Image (cartoon, rainbow, N blue to C red):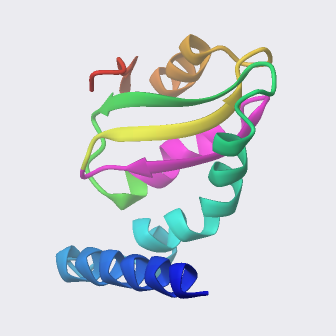
């Protein structure tokens, strides 16, 4: 129980740090913190089930996003792709993390979908 309480305290400190950095502008539905919390269960399941054939978390570098609205468009485009189980998009970081079954949709097809929406997208290397 003590380990769980300490983990919750670390999570709380992390969230408070994120809140301190939040500009507090824009609609609540575009909050990257809330988006990450909503998708946490999906992404955690994908991370712990990596032995599933094809399941990966793909990181994309995206250029051309100017606001949270742009990030919402990119997220919507990615979530419409077959095999995508969840994603998180940040215009501030210029990136997207996508939990996807790559046997259904390869990483390059995800980047093509984003490019089709008018943004520049490439697959980030492991070193990024």
Q: Residue at x 58, y 23 (%)?
A: 110
Placement of the N terminus among the 4 image quadrants: bottom right
Identify whether 44 is placed above or below 111: below
* Residue that sits furthest to the front in the current view: 2
**What is the quadrant of residue 108 in the picture?**
top right
x then y, percent, for residue 26: 33, 76
Q: Residue at x 56, y 80 (%)?
A: 4
Identify whether 32 is placed above or below 14: above
Q: Residue at x 52, y 74 (%)?
A: 29
**What is the quadrant of residue 47 in the picture?**
top right
Identify whether 29 is placed above or below 74: below
Q: Is residue 113 left or right of residue 69?
A: right
**What is the quadrant of residue 25 in the picture?**
bottom left
In this view, the residue in front, 61 or 11, is 11
x then y, percent, for residue 59: 45, 30
Q: Residue at x 31, y 82 (%)?
A: 13
Q: Is residue 73 left or right of residue 84?
A: left
x then y, percent, for residue 116: 52, 22
Residue 118 is at least partly visible in this image? no
Q: Magenta stretch?
A: 71-92
Residue 83 is at least partly visible in this image? yes
Q: Does residue 80 show up magenta in the picture? A: yes
Q: Is residue 47 left or right of residue 26?
A: right
Q: Does residue 65 show up magenta in the picture? A: no
In this view, the residue in front, 59 or 6, is 6
Placement of the C terminus among the 4 image quadrants: top left
């Amino acid at each position: 129980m003590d380990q769980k309480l300490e983990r919750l305290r670390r999570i709380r400190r992390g969230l408070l740090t994120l809140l301190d950095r939040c500009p507090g502008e824009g609609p609540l539905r575009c909050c990257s913190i809330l988006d990450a919390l909503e998708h946490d269960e999906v992404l955690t399941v994908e991370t712990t089930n990596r032995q599933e054939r094809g399941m990966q978390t793909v990181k994309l570098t995206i250029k051309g996003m100017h606001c949270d609205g742009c990030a919402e468009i990119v997220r919507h485009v990615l979530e419409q792709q077959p095999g995508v189980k969840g994603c998180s998009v940040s215009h501030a970081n210029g990136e997207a993390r996508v939990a996807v079954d790559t046997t259904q949709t390869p990483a390059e097809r995800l980047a093509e979908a984003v490019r089709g929406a008018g943004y520049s997208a490439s697959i980030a290397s492991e070193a990024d």
